[in-house]
Image (tube, rainbow, N blue to C red):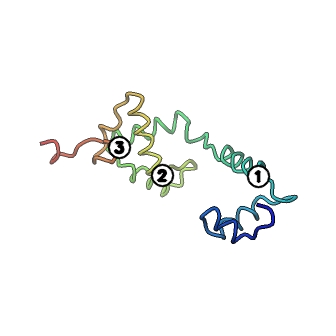
Amino acid sequence: MAGKSQRQIAAILCCYNSKISRELRRNRIHGYQPEMAQHSPTIRRRAAFKRHKRSQWLRDWVAERLKEHWSPEQIAGFMRRMNIPVQVSHLWVYDFIHRDRLLGGHLRCLCRHRNNRGGAQTQSEGS
């Protein structure tokens, strides 16, 4: 869209002009090159791949806490308070439970509350 202002480009793309400005600022080296602009986030995303969050010891540790009836929030909070070098969020734990379910596992049965992906029932729901 050569020759157009950032505001005009934003209007054509139906987005805010700050988004266009940020995109140009982030990806302008020797003029804006769309191919490089797409390549950069791909590289950043691959670098963000958290290999440590896929380690067997971490999955085993989280599974053990779930078997002890810890909630995902308790697991994440405990790791944060104890300054454990590898930390996970409660959302990661819910995703872990969901991935286990897709593979035929039963970690979802250990959850205290039903979540939107079909966790275990509480006492009052099961009656």
Q: Gap between marks 2 and 3, in whole Å?
A: 17 Å
Q: Residues within 10 Å of mark 3 (few under 14, many from 20)?
A: few
Q: Which secondary structure, mark 2? A: loop
Among the 4 quarters of the image, the one containing residue 10:
bottom right
What residue is shown with label 1? 34
**Image depth: mark 1 or mark 2 in front:** 1
What residue is shown with label 2? 89
Q: Position of residue 2 (x, y in %)?
A: 80, 62
Label 3 or label 1, whichever comes before in sequence order: 1
Of 117 and 54, nearer the camera is: 117
Q: Residue at x 46, y 39 (%)?
A: 61
For the C terminus, give its image quadrant. Answer: top left
Above or below: residue 25 compared with residue 80: below
Q: Which secondary structure, mark 3? A: loop
Q: Amino acid at mark 3?
A: Arg
Q: Amino acid at mark 1?
A: Pro
What residue is shown with label 3? 117
Among the 4 quarters of the image, the one containing residue 7:
bottom right
Q: Is residue 44 left or right of residue 75?
A: right
Q: Which secondary structure, mark 1? A: helix
For the N terminus, give its image quadrant. Answer: bottom right
Q: Position of residue 63 (x, y in %)?
A: 41, 37
User: Given contact means CB atoms under 8 Å apart, are the residues at marks 1 and 2 in contact?
Assistant: no
Q: Amino acid at mark 2?
A: Ser
Label 2 or label 3, whichever comes before in sequence order: 2
User: Given contact means CB atoms under 8 Å apart, are the residues at marks 2 and 3 in contact?
Assistant: no
**Image depth: mark 2 or mark 3 in front:** 3
Q: Gap between marks 1 and 2, in whole Å?
A: 34 Å
Outermost residue on the left side: it is 127
Above or below: residue 69 compared with residue 104: below
